[in-house]
Amino acid sequence: MIFIYRLITILLYPIFIILIYLRKLFNKEDDNRYKEKIFSSNFFPNRNDKKKLIWFHAASIGEVQSIFPLVKKLNNENNDLEFLITTVTLSSGNIVKKKFFAYKNVNHRYFPLDVNFLIKSFLNKWKPNLVIFIDSEIWPNLIFEIKKRKTPIALINGRITKKSFDKWMLISKFAKKIFNSFDLCLAASKESEKNLKELSVKNLIYFGNIKFSAEVERKDLTDKYLEILKEKTFWCAASTHKGEEIICLKAHLNLRKTYKDLITIIIPRHINRCIEIRDLCNKHKLSSQVLNDKELIKDNCEIIIINSFGALSKFYNYSKSVFIGKSMIKKLEKVSGQNPIEAAKLKCKIYHGPYVYNFKEIYDLLKSYKISEEINGEKDLCEKLSRDLKNSEDDENKTTDIINDMGQKILENTTREINKLLP
């Protein structure tokens, strides 16, 4: 099976190159560094051979943010370590560069295609002492080549849903050979732990989802934002998808009957939809503003549509009530849900729809602490928001401390297990 996989990836290599170039044309790749994915001449190793190198691979934003506390903790506890972080997406690469720009021993590269000759070259040049995959990043050529070199390899926050498990079982013999290659596997959930056990993982442990240990920075809004918002009644709809904004707008229209100064802040998952959302506001005769980075909130707008990346924590920090999207759209049921941990850590009351497949276990936990509640439409959302807005007292979630303590414990346990693997 591995022979067939290697043959397919080699045959598809020229097509992958064309696709990367096309993505570059559409500004989906780094203009200067996109060749890191496709040509070994652009791997540019930068390491101190006297130090041990840990290579973390995390595909996109959520995964890469989850390892920041881990990298920092390992770095603080060991003075002979270097770190290589590889990612796939442009946005995740930018976040790594921003987070670790002051760290001389942390390098970022874009992940090379899983083509055997590229993988061999990458490993020859970087020579990692430990390789760690995050979440569900499984690349057979890379895994088998690492194993051949007897380099320790781990999967942390391993996430195998029923859907992906069923796919792996179609090639069960090959799948078990892949998963048996890991020296350590830390499961992201009880469901993943059960599925990984079926896939013959040998050193399998469940501490909890490492995303609970993610750092949440209390970034203040600008003073002028606050001057406006403090005089208003407001709530936040975050990570919304097409079809969910209309629910939020209808809830706003109902709430406006009671709260004349109401502002609804909408942070779409994809900011290229801002104009579409503004047009929807116009259709319902709602004054709106597409708020670009460093602009000020206008005083006469009911709906503020955020047109910038990295704004969630800013608005979570001051919003008492938050609706988190990708949870109301039936057709997205199998890929539904957005990460609510950041909002929970910033003491928001969280509302979501019935479809939270990717974060079900996390939402169940938050529900048990009464941090989150499910809603079934604009009427339900309106009633719950109205209840929150009536309560003018600062009723901060004391259970947030439990969430933070849990995250710290997961981080400590994860760090301990990784240290065991270091040569």
Image: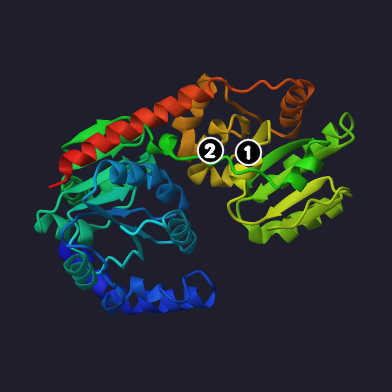
- Mark 1 touches mark 2? (CB < 8 Å): yes
Is residue 67 visible in the rendered image? The answer is yes
In this picture, residue 244 sits left or right of residue 368: right
Q: Residue at x 44, y 78 (%)?
A: 21
Q: Amino acid at mark 2?
A: Glu
Q: Tag 1's secondary structure?
A: helix
Q: Which residue is mark 1?
A: 316
The picture places residue 341, in percent across and down from the top left corner, at 51, 35
The picture places residue 78, in percent across and down from the top left corner, at 24, 44
The picture places residue 118, in percent across and down from the top left corner, at 24, 71
Q: Tag 2's secondary structure?
A: helix
How far apart are labels 1 and 2 at the CA level? 8 Å
Q: Residue at x 31, y 29 (%)?
A: 207
Is residue 195 visible in the rendered image? The answer is no
Q: Which mark is residue 242?
A: none
Q: Amino acid at mark 1?
A: Tyr
Residue 392 versus residue 205 in the image, above or below: above
- Would you identify the image quadrant in which residue 60 lies? bottom left
In this picture, residue 110 sits left or right of residue 364: left
